[in-house]
Every structure is written in C-alpha cells, then in structure tokens.
Image: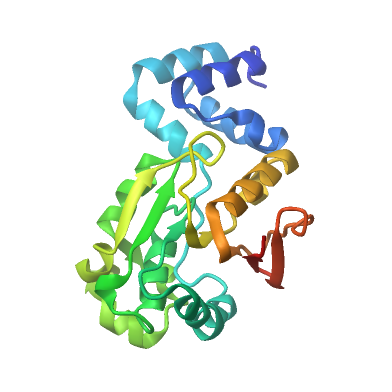
Amino acid sequence: MIQGDYEEFKKSIFSLTKIDLNAYKEKQMRRRIDSLITRNSFKDYAGYAEGLKKDTGLFDEFVNYITINVSEFYRNPDQWKLMDTEFIPELKKKFGENLKIWSAACSTGDEPYSLVMAFSRHIPLNKIKIHATDLDKTVIGKAKVGLYSAKSLLGVPSDLKDKYFDKVGPSYQIKDEIKKQVEFKEHNLLKDAYPSNQDLIVCRNVLIYFTEEAKDEVFRKFAASLKKGGILFIGSTEQIMNYKDMGYERRNSFFYEKVR
C-alpha cells in the first residue's frame, strides 16, 4: 500500500500536467498509479510527485502509463464498413468534399490514419484533412513516426494495406501521402476548448475510463462542436444513455447524428 494523501497527490498531478485524475474511476486509476510508483521504488505519493517534477524521464513515463493507449487500425471492422458504405457518402453529399473531421483521443495514430484511408475511397487524398488530438505527447510522437506491428494492421482491407504501407523488417511504415493529411496536436478533453463546426467526430473506446459525469460533459461538448447533421462515431464499449437530451439522434449503435 502506497503511503500518503492521494487527494493531495491528485492536486499535484493537476498542477504538473493539467490531467484531472478526479475524472477517472478512482479504484482503477489508483491501482495503476500505485503499481507504477512501486516499480520506480518510491514509498509514498509525495515523494513520487517530487520525482516527477525533477525527472523528465519519470514524468513522461507517468503520462504515458496513465493514458489508455489500446489502438489498432480499423478496430471493429463492421463499423468501418458501415462508415464506408453509409456515413462517408452521406457526409460528402451533405457537406461536400472539404470535410472537417476530428479524431479525438487518437492515441498512436491508427484511428486518424484509418480515417484517411477510408475517406480515400470517396474523396481525393489532397482534400482529406484530419485534426487528430491526444493528451499524451508520447503517443503523438509515435503517431508521427507511423511505424506499426503486423498485429495492428489485421483489420486493414488488403488493398489499402498494399497501397499505403511499406514493410520495414517485421513492422509496417505508413506512407507519407497518408501522414501528411493528418495534423496532430495535444488536447485535453476535460480542459481544453473544442474545435467548432465539425462534420465528423471520432472518439472510440476512451470514455469508458471516465466517470459518468465526465462522460456526460464530453458528449455534450461533442454535440456543441458538431454541425447540425454532423456525425459522432463512438466505440463498441460505449453508449450515450441520454442522447436525445443532448440533441443527438441514434443512427446505429455507435453512430449518432446531431439533429438540433
């Protein structure tokens, strides 16, 4: 058991990183943090917080460890097929080819790069622009490198895999023509301003780690960020219980349209 005041530790972390640990399920997050503290041979929260201030390696490890980075290309392929056959054509018809697309909590880039490839079947590559954000600068760095394991690519349609990846040893490098259509930035969903007038927002399998209050806040902010007729694409582990109150219409289990 790690010694010290966890409440004070949470305040220290917010001061250092602007990450609000109150927004995460405490039991789960505290267990992850305690494990990390033990691994680094600290005895208490205060000592570890001091270590984070002084050691950039320790600080980067902490941010990387507590942010959830489970990602793969075309995760839940059936949902991406629906995106390809129904929602991309619909968005193109409604809003044209110069769409505003936000991949929120994008992790190591698998999702925004999947979006570029999916849209490339419908829109010229040079017209596709994805705004991709994540809290963790370490995973953004990995995303910009664009080197992935074979396992990450299992869901990618074979024609897109052949066209847009180069084999590098046992790994795969995504081509620059896909990379340059994505702009990566740091962003905290619970603190920072949201982009406006979005046609499509994709945020999948991240909010399950948030409290119900934090989830509610984020889904409401997404609604405010979308144009009327815009689409929110969420993960297979998530659902919006009070979507009608927020101005959404549920189009499918994981796709919600802003209707007011």
Residue pictured at 57% horizontal, 59% vertical: 204
Which image quarter is the C terminus in? bottom right
| Between 190 and 195, the one nearer to me in the picture | 195
Q: Is residue 43 visible in the rendered structure shown here?
A: no
Residue pictured at 49% horizontal, 18% vertical: 15
Q: Is residue 156 left or right of residue 221?
A: left
Name the spot of residue 14 as percent of width and height, x first. 52, 23
On screen, 75 above or below 159?
above
Total count of labels = 0
Q: Is residue 233 left or right of residue 126?
A: right
Name the spot of residue 84 as percent of width and height, x first. 49, 82
On screen, 60 above or below 152?
above
Q: Is residue 125 visible in the rendered structure shown here?
A: yes
Name the spot of residue 90 as percent of width and height, x first. 52, 80
Q: Quadrant of residue 252?
A: bottom right
Name the spot of residue 1 as percent of width and height, x first. 67, 22
Q: Quadrant of residue 17?
A: top left
On screen, 7 above or below 217?
above
